[in-house]
Image (cartoon, rainbow, N blue to C red):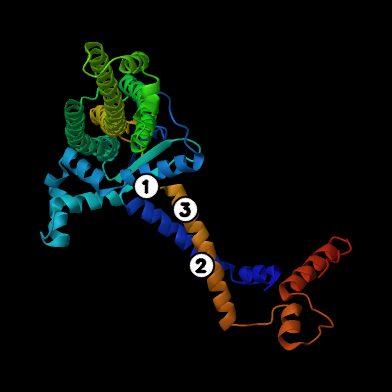
């Protein structure tokens, strides 16, 4: 519908529209005068999203989105049932006769009046966070200005208390948990230290960094190895001489053995034996075997031969003993070297075991120290009595009621009356459709308009004006239709 047509319809039914608008204004005035007056107490609290942590070295930076979420969370805390219960307890609202009567009327005395009262006062609480700051406004509506201010202040105070509890109670629980963990970790540290001490006592290990003992044992192993190599060379030499001796004995030429040829005493005895044999040969040619010189020379020769045989036997026995002693010495040195190697391996194994035990002790000590430090911080946090929230403004009893507002109600009545007037005019026009202009005729019947006569009242007014002007001798002025 064109706006011109709508305005034309409103003008045609202007009397009805005027009555409706006046009626709505009168209703708004009556409502403003008859409705009970309500007062709004407003308190303001400020929150710091970064918090106040005396244990922190510097405040942490918080993103803007998280800060906005933090403010929204604080709004939910203020509107929580827990804070409302604290307000009920602080103001002792459960003993208010009016609330008791209302509780009995609505619930019949069934349920907790404390919870019911908390839900009731939450209905009249409005929490509005500021758009460009961290200030939150708490508004409470009541029929009494003093009650509105008291309850708004009670919500602000108990919100601070609830914020402190939300911060301290988890710290208290964590403090108890950390105390138990500290005791357990202390017991684990003592057990690890006991194992380390027992292992050091049992194996005689000084420490994981004391490698002098291993170095000394390694040097001793090197010395034993050198002796073992020398003993092996001596054994091989003795066995070689023993084999040569055995070969010479097997061939019946024991005096050709190397040890015999290299024995100076045997060489001297052989020299004397050769002289004795020469002298005996000379004596045997000159004397008979019964002659004393013959017998003396023969006895000397036999004595030297027995000495040479005995010395050869001693030399061969010495070679055998030297070979046996060399083999035994080599075996003993090899056994000693193996024991020394095993000792070094055992020492290294002990050092490795000690290192593991040391690391266990260090790990247990680190865990104990960390838990002890964190537990101390948690205990300090549980004793804090300040929060990151503060009351910016306390509510005071308002001087003027917040509702009903006469001007606002009049404005709403005017708008509502205008809307109802438009609706009533359109409804009446729908059920009483008339042709009032050329546009209606053209749109309704699709009949073109050739001419339009002026309104009767306008024509009569023009006729009367013309007569009056003629009587004055003045030409009538023609007004456009």
Look at the numbered disc 3 and give the secondary structure of its residue. Answer: helix
Quadrant in which residue 168 is drawn? top left
Residue 212 spot, x, y in % from top left: 33, 19
Question: Residue 420: which numbered mark, if any?
Answer: 2
Name the foreground residue: 457 vs 289. 289
Q: Quadrant of the N terminus?
A: bottom right
Q: Earlier in the sequence, mark 3 or mark 2?
A: 3
Look at the numbered disc 2 and give the secondary structure of its residue. Answer: helix
Question: Which residue has dot 3 on it?
Answer: 410
Q: Label 1 to label 3, Cα distance in Å?
A: 13 Å
Residue at image point 50% right, 53% down: 411
Q: Is residue 184 left or right of residue 237?
A: left
Q: Label 1 to label 2, Cα distance in Å?
A: 24 Å
Residue 265 spot, x, y in % from top left: 33, 14
Quadrant in which residue 78 is drawn? top left
Q: Is residue 207 left or right of residue 478?
A: left
Q: Nearer the viewer, mark 1 or mark 2?
A: 1
Label 2 CA crowd tier, 10 Å (few <14, some 14–19, many 20+): some
Look at the numbered disc 1 and give the secondary structure of its residue. Answer: loop
Residue at image point 73% right, 88% down: 445
Q: Is the Cβ of the residue at disc 1 closer than 8 Å to that at disc 3?
A: no
Q: Earlier in the sequence, mark 1 or mark 2?
A: 1
Question: Residue 403: which numbered mark, if any?
Answer: 1
Above or below, 79 relative to 270: below
Quadrant in which residue 374 is drawn? top left
């Amino acid at each position: 519908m064109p706006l011109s047509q709508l305005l034309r319809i409103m003008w045609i039914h202007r009397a009805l529209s005027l009555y409706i608008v006046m009626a709505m204004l009168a209703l708004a005035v009556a409502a403003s005068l008859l409705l009970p007056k309500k007062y709004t107490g407003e308190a303001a609290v400020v929150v710091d999203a970064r918090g106040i942590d005396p244990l922190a070295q510097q405040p942490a930076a918080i993103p803007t989105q998280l800060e906005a979420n933090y403010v929204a969370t604080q709004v939910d805390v203020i509107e929580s049932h827990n804070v409302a219960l604290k307000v009920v307890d602080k103001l002792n609202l459960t003993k208010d006769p009016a609330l008791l009567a209302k509780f009995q009327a609505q619930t019949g005395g069934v349920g907790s009046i404390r919870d019911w009262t908390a839900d009731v006062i939450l209905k009249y609480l409005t929490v509005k966070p500021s758009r460009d700051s961290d200030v939150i406004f708490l508004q409470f509506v009541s029929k009494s200005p003093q009650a509105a201010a008291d309850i708004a202040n009670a919500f602000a105070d108990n919100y601070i208390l609830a914020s402190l509890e939300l911060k301290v109670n988890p710290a208290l629980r964590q403090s108890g948990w950390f105390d138990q963990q500290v005791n357990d970790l202390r017991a684990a540290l003592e057990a690890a230290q006991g194992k380390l001490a027992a292992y050091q006592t049992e194996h005689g290990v000084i420490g994981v960094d004391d490698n002098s003992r291993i170095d000394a044992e390694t040097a001793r192993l090197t010395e034993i190895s050198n002796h073992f190599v020398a003993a092996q060379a001596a054994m091989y030499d003795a066995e070689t001489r023993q084999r040569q001796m055995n070969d010479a004995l097997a061939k019946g030429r024991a005096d050709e053995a190397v040890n015999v040829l290299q024995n100076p005493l045997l060489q001297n005895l052989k020299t004397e034996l050769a002289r004795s044999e020469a002298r005996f040969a000379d004596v045997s040619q000159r004397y008979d075997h019964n002659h004393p010189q013959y017998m003396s020379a023969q006895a000397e020769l036999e004595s030297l031969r027995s000495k040479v045989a005995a010395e050869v036997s001693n030399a061969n026995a010495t070679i055998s003993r030297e070979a046996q002693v060399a083999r035994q010495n080599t075996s003993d040195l090899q056994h000693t070297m193996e024991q020394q190697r095993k000792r070094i391996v055992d020492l290294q194994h002990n050092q490795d075991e000690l290192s593991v035990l040391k690391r266990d002790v260090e790990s247990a000590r680190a865990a104990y120290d960390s838990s002890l430090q964190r537990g101390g911080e948690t205990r300090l946090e549980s004793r804090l009595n300040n929060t990151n929230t503060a009351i910016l403004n306390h509510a005071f009893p308002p001087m003027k009621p917040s509702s009903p507002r006469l001007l606002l109600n009049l404005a709403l009545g005017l708008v509502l009356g205008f809307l109802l007037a438009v609706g009533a005019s359109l409804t009446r026009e729908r059920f009483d459709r008339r042709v009032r202009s050329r546009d209606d005729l053209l749109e309704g019947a699709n009949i073109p308009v050739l001419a339009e006569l002026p309104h009767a009242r306008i024509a009569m007014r023009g006729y009367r004006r013309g007569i009056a002007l003629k009587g004055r001798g003045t030409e009538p002025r023609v007004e456009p239709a």
